[in-house]
Image: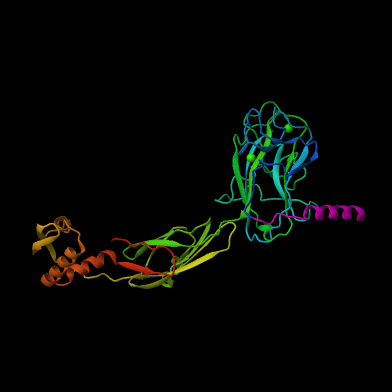
Amino acid sequence: MLCIAIVTSAGADAQCVNPIGAFPHQEDFEGAPVWTVGGTGSDWAWGTPAHPLINTAGGGANSWCVGGLTGTFYNLGQSSWLESPCFDMTALDHPWISFKIFWECERQYDGMNLQYSVNGGTTWDNVGAYNDPVDCLNDNWFNAANITNLSGASPKHGWSGRLGATSGSCQGGSGSNTWITAKHCMPVLANAPEVIFRFLFGAGTQCNNYDGIAIDDILIQEAPTTTAAFSYICNGNTIDFTDTSSGCPSTWGWSFGDPGSGSLNSTGAQNPSHTYPGPGSYLVSFSADGPCSDPSNTDMTIGILGSRSRAPIPHAQAYWAPRQQRSWAAMALKPSSGNRAERPATITRTDRRDLFRYRERTERLFGHGERDHQRGRSGRCGGHAGHGPLRRSIA
Ligand SMILES: [Ca+2]
Ligand SMILES: [Ca+2]
């Protein structure tokens, strides 16, 4: 036992003499193979797949494929793997992997998964699990919960299935039917100094007349950061909030700064609304979190303004008489009891000086009602914040 342990340890050290520590790390399998294959009955092959279904690389010209590059058969009783070089992930706080995969194998009995080892291959664990929640960083992960011949994995979660239907005793269905991108967070590998991955394949001894499984375009990097941000629009005292966080937010937390509203003062909804009791300043706290990121928070003080003068607002119609191209000879203003719709139609020039003159004359004739009216439309609520986009409504 001692002798075996020493040999295994020496092998582990040898694999991690020059670990890959630069990220993002991309492996498109176009150059000479740096990933290695092993196991029992392995028929992994590197090159351009030319199976009936798997007949291209996932990207470029080359991929790795178990079941060889041609024909429709993978070895009976195979238990094999495609293994990565060693990675030094001490700089990755939220490591994340994505790659392309095309599986076409007997469902249930044959299949593949992705595993990692942090001890040079002495022990292996699955990356993620069957039925993990899907979000923008976790998708197309294991579709099978118990692949009979994936004996090197515990639990035996992985990808399994094929395009055709079950025929006789050969199980069908659940194939990928094309190249798809699988991706998953790997929080357990955060800051791990020596990491090896392997795609582990297991097959039974019958019903193996299928293309196999191909892998391409591996990407390992720090997951995109989630940064909390929101915008809002006002409908009187009701504010409609919209999550505008970057990254991959999947959970949210709101506190509306309105403790008087009791349980309504907080929610985990992504895009909530909250109705405030009346004018005042309210400190809205917002947090967003993603599947592989640190929580992010932002605050914004929102002011609900009281109703401005809604008293009868003097309307004015302006009649402009151009004498020259850029000046106006005569400006006559008169009160109008008409509705607002008719007023803008009479202002055909938006030159700032003219508009200013128009306002001056309006106010001199009718007081400040017109300005109050303008402010009331856009200022029912407003806000200021250190950061985050801001939108305001026209009530
Ligand atoms: Ca490729
Ligand atoms: Ca089989």
- Number of numbered discs visible in the structure rendering: 0
Q: Is residue 22 above or below residue 263?
A: above
Q: Tell me, yes or no, if residue 312 can be seen here.
A: no
The spot of residue 1 in percent (x, y) is: 91, 54
> 214 or 60, which lies in front?
60
Name which residue lies at 59% across and 43% down: 181
The one nearer the camera, 74 or 65, is 65
Q: Position of residue 281 (x, y in %)?
A: 37, 73
| Quadrant in the picture for the C terminus | bottom left
Q: How is the image coloured?
A: rainbow
Name the image quarter holding residue 179: top right
Q: Quadrant of ligand 2?
A: top right
The span shown in magenta is 1-22
Q: Residue 199 location in percent, x, y?
A: 71, 44
Occupied quadrant, residue 165: top right
| Above or below 50: residue 329 | below
The percent coordinates of residue 61 (x first, y second) are 63, 36
Question: Is the stretch drawn in magenta largely helix, strand or loop?
Answer: helix
- Taking the magenta stretch, the answer to whether it contains residue 13 is yes
Residue 112 showing in the rendered view: yes
Residue drawn at the location 32% of the way across and 61% of the way down? 393
Q: Is residue 63 magenta?
A: no
Looking at the rendering, which quadrant does residue 107 occupy?
top right
| In front of the other: 198 or 302 | 198
Whether residue 107 sits left or right of residue 304 in the image: it is right
Residue drawn 73% across the image and 40% down it: 201
User: Viewed as shown, does residue 318 lie left or right of 190?
Assistant: left
345 above or below 111? below
Left/right of residue 117 with respect to residue 337 in the rendered view: right
